[in-house]
């Protein structure tokens, strides 16, 4: 195993609800799930429907020790957790982290309330893995593994959401999605998380033309993403959290437009791998 690699793999890039069909083949239909490899360590951000395939791949690789870190707990970010094979395997060590409901609900309580009848047939006590639950507060600096630093801050999303800045081996990845921007304003919290990052994964659910009908939904646009990219002096910008109705051709079109404004832009696809 290459212990120097800082690798990002997108297992799910769609927002709101999984989709399928001929018009969603190139970018995929799974909801938010991103695997981050820092040398020998594996972190998974969000447990959308893409988590099922991520779990199968980790198991096939023989990875038995990793962290699952939630941005928040809306359905599209947790729906894959009950179908994540490692949590049922007694040889696995899995730590689950959250901070968006600090002081309101713990990570353990989130999982217990979600995985139970009548919404799911069984409760978490069926899980045979060694499960650990970690709670934090927005603004905390996390050190989930040796040499990995994760800075956190709050994003503008109904019910709360956490943005992350992952620093390892001199490289920086920022995960900024499920956040709504205010017209004409670059959020200082977001700028603080993305400054100088090698890669920023950003919420591009809507377009600026669609925003007047979507205020309060908690999402942003590719147009605002490229403004942040330039202001933050980042390396690459990944358009993420594609709207469930957004077809491959539409995403292709937006990617081309975004590249004209910020050359390092690409639209994230399910299964895509980026080495930093």
Image (tube, helix red, strand yellow):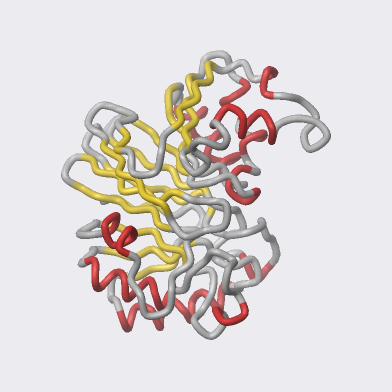
Residue 117: x percent and y percent? 81, 31
The correct choice, above or below, for 15 with respect to 245 in the image is above
Residue 229: x percent and y percent? 29, 69
Which of the two residues, 78 or 52, is positioned nearer the viewer here? 78
Which residue occupies 42% across, 79% down? Answer: 183
The correct choice, above or below, for 172 with respect to 42 in the image is below
Which residue occupies 43% across, 28% down? Answer: 66
Task: Give the total of numbered labels.
Answer: 0
The correct choice, above or below, for 102 with respect to 206 in the image is above
Q: Among all residues in the image, which is located at the extreme left?
A: 170
Residue 221: x percent and y percent? 47, 73
Residue 63: x percent and y percent? 44, 25
Q: Quadrant of residue 47?
A: top right
Which residue occupies 20% across, 67% down? Answer: 233
Left or right: 169 in relation to 56: left
Figure quadrant of the N terminus: top left
Which of the two residues, 81 or 8, is positioned nearer the viewer here? 81
Left or right: 93 in relation to 110: left
Q: Quadrant of residue 119?
A: top right
Q: Among all residues in the image, which is located at the extreme front?
A: 103
The correct choice, above or below, for 232 with respect to 169 in the image is below
Which of the two residues, 30 or 105, is positioned nearer the viewer here? 105
């Amino acid at each position: 195993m290459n212990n120097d690699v800082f690798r990002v793999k997108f297992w799910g890039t769609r927002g709101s609800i999984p989709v399928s069909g001929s018009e969603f083949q190139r970018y995929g239909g799974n909801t938010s799930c991103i695997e981050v490899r820092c040398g020998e360590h594996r972190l998974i951000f969000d447990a959308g429907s893409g988590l099922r395939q991520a779990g199968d791949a980790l198991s096939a690789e023989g990875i038995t020790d990793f962290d699952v870190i939630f941005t928040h707990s809306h359905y599209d970010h947790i729906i894959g957790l009950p179908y994540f094979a490692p949590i049922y395997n007694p040889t696995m060590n899995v730590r689950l982290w959250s901070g968006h409901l600090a002081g309101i609900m713990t990570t353990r309580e989130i999982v217990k309330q979600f995985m139970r009848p009548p919404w799911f047939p069984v409760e978490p006590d069926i899980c045979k893995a060694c499960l650990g639950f970690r709670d934090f507060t927005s603004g905390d600096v996390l050190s989930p593994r040796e040499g990995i630093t994760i800075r956190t801050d709050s994003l503008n999303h109904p019910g709360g959401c956490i943005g992350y800045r992952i620093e390892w081996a001199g490289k920086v990845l920022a995960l900024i999605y499920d956040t709504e921007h205010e017209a004409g304003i670059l959020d200082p919290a977001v700028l603080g998380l993305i400054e100088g990052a090698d890669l920023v994964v950003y919420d591009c659910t809507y377009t600026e033309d669609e925003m007047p009908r979507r205020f309060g939904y908690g999402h942003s646009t590719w147009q605002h993403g490229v403004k942040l990219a330039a202001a933050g002096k980042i390396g690459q910008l990944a358009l993420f959290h594609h709207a469930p109705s957004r077809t491959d051709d539409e995403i292709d079109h937006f990617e081309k437009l975004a590249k004209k404004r910020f050359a390092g832009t690409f639209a994230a696809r399910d299964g895509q791998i980026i080495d930093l």
